[in-house]
Image: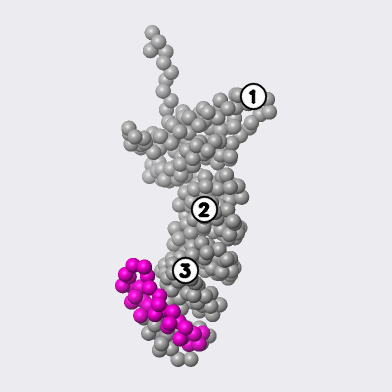
Amino acid sequence: MKSLFKAKPKTPADLVRQTRELLISVVERNSDTREAKREEKLLELSKTIRELKSILYGDSEAEPVSEACAQVTREFFREDTLRLIIVSLPNLNLETRKDATQVVANLQRQQVNSRLIACDYLEANLNLMDILIKGYEDADMVLHYGAMLRECIRHQSVAKYMLESEHMMKLFDYIQLPNFDVAGDAAATFKELLTRHKATVAEFLSKNYDWFFAEYNSKLLESSNYITRRLAIKLLGDMMLDRSNSGVMTRYVSSKDNLRILMNLLRESSKSIQIEAFHVFKLFVANQHKPAEIVGILVANRNKLLRLFADLKTDKEDEQFEADKAQVVKEIAGLEA
């Protein structure tokens, strides 16, 4: 007889609704709620989030089922559950935070009727990015909120909002913080914003050239921190060599101040920084419309540059690098003041 009264298994949508109810109780944290009762709710919440993660990612026994994933996704964005899970994250234990982060990340990629409904939701709730970016001010939350933020940036409209907001300026400061986890995660988000959506990035750099590169040069390329300088020169090369940014690149390599910074980076003791700096420096030399002041600096430093390039080699044989270097040497040797 017992089998007749077994609980009906929860559907994926039921699980999301249950998660939502538990999240609300965690957020409210009524003063009359006993601590034991609250711990019970948190344990139940951990279990439901783990089950949602299993539906979305599959497990060792089964691959994810597309219809179940679609049910979870629809229900998740129907009643603002994404906001609840983000706001509630600091109240969860470490393992549950990890599971919740993976659930939020996966939902950004789930299509329902061939649409990324997460994108529609975030466009209507862009202030969620304001919550996620504050994770860089909390060392306990940074890795979770940072991972969520980068997944949300997959959507072009979200990336555009971030680029055009005050948060872009804040990232320069977060990257310089002494906490390695915070600085490293902020740098990862910064790179994602400046490389994922080519046309959006090109428009942003064109409109914000002056303040952006003033900050980039002084705070990143001339940072006293070796790791910051190395990441910054690598990212600069990625941006300058991208065809979408050709107009910005031409403007950048026409500046004598930028050239001086690059020449200083070429003199670094770190070979990796030297190599990355060379990839940007060669653009100054290759510019067919070099301003006279750029030519003057290159001619004045010709002998030093040629000696430096004679010793500059990659760890592994790289024919393209050697060809580029030979061309740069030829160009500099042939310059006339």
| Residue type highlighted by circle 3 | Ser
Asked if residue 244 lies left or right of residue 132, the reply is: left
- Whole-angstrom CA distance, mark 3 to mark 2, is 23 Å
**Secondary element at tag 1:** loop
CA distance for labels 1 and 2: 37 Å
Residue closest to the eye, 48 or 68: 48
Q: Are marks 1 and 2 in contact (CB under 8 Å)?
A: no
For disc 1, the marked residue is 34
Is residue 176 shown left or right of residue 76?
right
Q: Magenta stretch: give its range.
A: 297-326
Please report whichever mark, 3 or 2, sits nearer to the chain's N-terminal start: 2
Q: Label 3 to label 1, Cα distance in Å? A: 58 Å
Q: Which of the image's four quarters has the N terminus?
A: top left
Q: Residue 242: x percent and y percent? A: 42, 67
Residue 301 in the image, given as x and y percentages of width and height: 49, 85
* N-term-proximal mark, 1 vs 2: 1
Q: Quadrant of residue 209?
A: bottom right
Position of residue 230 measured from the top left corner of the image (x, y, whole percent): 49, 65
Say how many tags the image has: 3
* Labelled pair 3, 2 in contact (Cβ < 8 Å): no
Q: Is residue 153 left or right of residue 1?
A: right
Residue under the image location 44 percent in, 69 percent down: 271
Can you identify the residue that label 3 sits on?
270
Mark 3, other Cα within 10 Å: few <14 / some 14–19 / many ≥20: few
At x 60%, y 24%, the residue is: 36
Residue 68 in sight from this viewpoint = yes
Say which mark, if any, is on residue 185: 2
